[in-house]
Amino acid sequence: MSKDFTASEVQALIRPHTGAVTGFERTARGFMSDLTAIVDCERGPFFVKAVRNSPGGRRDSITREKQVNAFVWPISPALRWHVEDGSWVVLGFEAVEGRPANFGPDSADLRSIVELVECIGRLKLPPVAEGWPETRWDPFVRNDSEAEFFRGETLLHTDINPSNLLVGESGMWAVDWAWPTRGGRPSSIRPSWIFNWWPPDTVPSLRSRGGAQCTAWAEAEPKALDEFAAAQLRMYRTAVGRKPDSPWLHAMVAAGQSWVEHRGVTVD
């Protein structure tokens, strides 16, 4: 049993599903989790994600992840069990071995990244996602007509980044469906999969070495991609205004500016 009080609480709660725990290794948690860990145990191993059981974003997020899992397997590891009490909500996933995908300009992962994004784009919208419209870009468009470009009937992951694409010996998984939504074709590829969370010098490599081959890119209206590029840039500019001391946000503004210039878009 871990001496970490938080981990001890979670271990006690999940024991009916794990049996005796022989190892509890915390992992880097995402923004929408309070605890993540690899649990070696009598019935595992499992990847465990836990949030405090209180109303609001994190509980809503883990509920969505639980509800969508059956519809995104086997692209994603299977949810084996879930449990909650008055303090915690916990999901127990099949543990998979993999490393974060490499988005570098000479990476051998680029083709597989494109293929996995294609697979996500082909997923059927599950009934549970009908009530999850994608609206987070609305503050960064100029009018309702531009916002309509992001509406649609496609299941969106919304956080495709290297840490959420795991490369294993037998394939690649999309993990951390922390906030799936329903949106349109242009945002189903989430051009943010180029810009979020890694150096912007990867943008040209993905744009020229696979990203444009995605069906969603090919089928999207150029105007829709233009508006999404503009919305991305406005979002990062706003974020920099709130956190001016965050170097990565300044890098994302630069990357966003590069993208709109590449597309010939002027952003106010």
Image: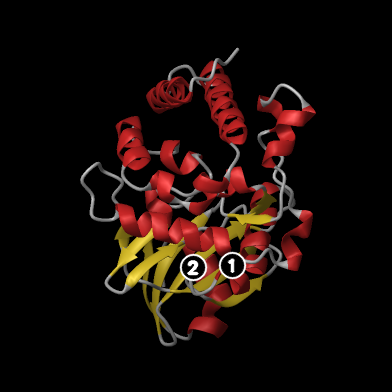
**Circle 1: residue type:** Val
Residue at 72 percent across and 40 percent down: it is 135
The residue identified by callout 1 is 90
- Can residue 217 be seen at all in this image of the molecule? yes
Q: Residue furthest left?
A: 106
Image quarter hosting the N terminus:
bottom left
* Relative horizontal placement of residue 262, taking residue 128 as reference (left or right): left
- Can residue 31 be seen at all in this image of the molecule? no
Return the x and y of residue 99 as percentages of the image width and height: 30, 60
Residue at 50 percent across and 73 percent down: it is 93
Tags 2 and 1 touching, CB below 8 Å: yes
In the image, residue 85 above or below residue 254: below
Q: On the image, which quarter does residue 10 sit in? A: bottom right
User: In terms of depth relative to the viewer, which is nearer, 45 or 228?
Assistant: 228
Return the x and y of residue 247 as percentages of the image width and height: 38, 23
Identify the secondary structure beneath mark 1: strand
